[in-house]
Amino acid sequence: MTLPLFLDYSGIAVAAVSGALAAGRRQLDLVGVVVVATVTAIGGGTLRDLLLERHVFWIANPDMLLVILGATVATMLWTRYAPPPAKALLVADGLALGFFAVAGARIAEGAGQTGIVVIVMAMITAVAGGIVRDVLCTQVPLVMRSGSLYATAAIAGGSAWVLLREWGMAPEPAAAISTVTAVTLRFIAIIWDVRLPTYRVNHPEGP
Amino acid sequence: MTLPLFLDYSGIAVAAVSGALAAGRRQLDLVGVVVVATVTAIGGGTLRDLLLERHVFWIANPDMLLVILGATVATMLWTRYAPPPAKALLVADGLALGFFAVAGARIAEGAGQTGIVVIVMAMITAVAGGIVRDVLCTQVPLVMRSGSLYATAAIAGGSAWVLLREWGMAPEPAAAISTVTAVTLRFIAIIWDVRLPTYRVNHPEGP
Amino acid sequence: MTLPLFLDYSGIAVAAVSGALAAGRRQLDLVGVVVVATVTAIGGGTLRDLLLERHVFWIANPDMLLVILGATVATMLWTRYAPPPAKALLVADGLALGFFAVAGARIAEGAGQTGIVVIVMAMITAVAGGIVRDVLCTQVPLVMRSGSLYATAAIAGGSAWVLLREWGMAPEPAAAISTVTAVTLRFIAIIWDVRLPTYRVNHPEGP
């Protein structure tokens, strides 16, 4: 298995774990859990492929759906016997964020895009699945709640990829370093609650 | 009119009824009602067509939009003179679920997809429109609320189609039987509140 | 710069302003503000381009993203020194509604669509970005809240375009008149709280 493919499968598996945990908090039935886990895992990549006019990855490669199903069932079995650690959902979501950001950047580059579009695709791939998960579970999307370097971490991963590739690095090490960059930044933000400055505006009267 | 086309128009009409009823509960204005009914009726099929790289069905065949308009206006007139039965929205939604699941399966098969992708397309076509309806009306999506065999009914309809077609059945009877399968399952779940086991996980601390 | 292009850039800039103001009310961090502003500005046109099987406009022309970034930063700087007027968000949103409706109509016509599809594309282009903005900010979408001629104004702009073009008017004046039609209608509705009749249905029991 090549490194990019390994990163793709890893991203899909951990995203499915985050979706299953979110669904478990809402006490969905077993099929509902699989649906939410699947949407979380394929949402971002699906949107990326539609935007780039590529074949949708999980239609071209339906094995992906079995990886999602396996990760979801494993999560349900595991949490039946041991409660998940406090931040299990955040950790799974943060790993998926890093894997997906770099998958998005790599695929956008392969589709001939450059610079800003590559970085935007990294961000879309990384955050869209989690947004759909949270809207379905009627939670405020993590990307909106946390403030703590969520979209920022995805953009950092995408930017690292663009820079490293521009400097001539091969795809495998560039993918590894960019993924670590995004995940590290997100985890630092989770652990120490690091935040960018917020923008606040008072509307004297609003719609 | 062929049977598949009849099933498509029926699905779109009852989905529009469910959308109009949902909009009426939110007291939208007349144009808003038409917008919600339209989104409910075309949402699932539109996503299916984008994923399968087909022409979007209602752009290829704008008459569909007139069917939606007719069903919406009829619903508004009808409920002006008689309050809708208690479960009118659920019944309309359940019928649309069955029609759309089988339309999705049939079209995915026609696009050369097999097995799991056909079933996933059945589910997406069946549930996406209702999700958008409920998000717009700021309701928890029915697929998340009910627990009661919602996505499950769509998956059953898609699976019935795959099996019957594999056994060599012609499209017309296969479509009829699969639709009845999905709708019956959903209606049984509504009437007797049948549920699959739920999955519940306690997060000691959550995001 | 041609008039259509000028209208496109204007629509994107004012939509970004409305997104930044909505994000500021939710106290997002600086990157989150840019993300919401971007989604608001590109959401409708992106959906339109996917439906019409065109290249997505901001991938074909990434300069658009810089216009959005500029408008967002300008909004953050401006509101730092002076609170925005009471209806700033509604005004920016209403202008974007008009610009986007006519951009959608014009592009649908250029893609060979006619009549009802052109008008539906005008509406989708005009309202989709604001819906995503409001769902992300966990607000009830403006199109659902206001009642006050929101989708209606977009449909009026699209219909004006179809009529004027059918009467043989050149694109530039037709675009100008249609934009003014939509924006005027929306602003009248905001100022005097004009509403269409609402449709209300009492569900004796609901899902």
Image (cartoon, coloured by chain):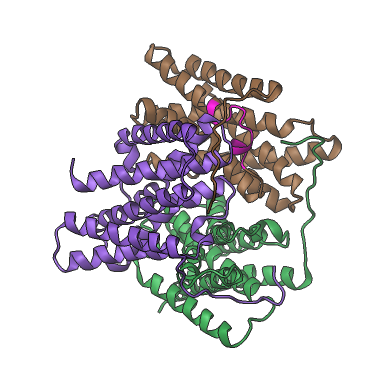
Chain colours: A purple, B brown, C green
Total labels: the figure holds: 0
Closest to the observer: B57 or A79? A79
For residue B144: magenta?
yes
Could you say which quadrant of the image residue A105 lies in? bottom left
B91 vs A158, left or right, is right
At x 42%, y 31%, the residue is A73
At x 54%, y 31%, the residue is B151
C108 vs A99, left or right, is right
Could you say which quadrant of the image residue B49 lies in? top left
For residue C165: magenta?
no
- From the viewer's perspective, is residue A52 above or below residue B148? below
* Residue B72, image x, y percentages: 69, 41
Q: Residue most toward the right?
A: B81
At x 51%, y 23%, the residue is B157
C140 vs A7, left or right, is right
* Residue A27, image x, y percentages: 58, 36
- From the viewer's perspective, is residue B127 above or below residue C64? above
Magenta span of residues: B141-152
Closest to the observer: C29 or A104? C29
* Residue A157, image x, y percentages: 31, 62
Closest to the observer: B91 or A152? A152
* Residue C151 visible at all: no
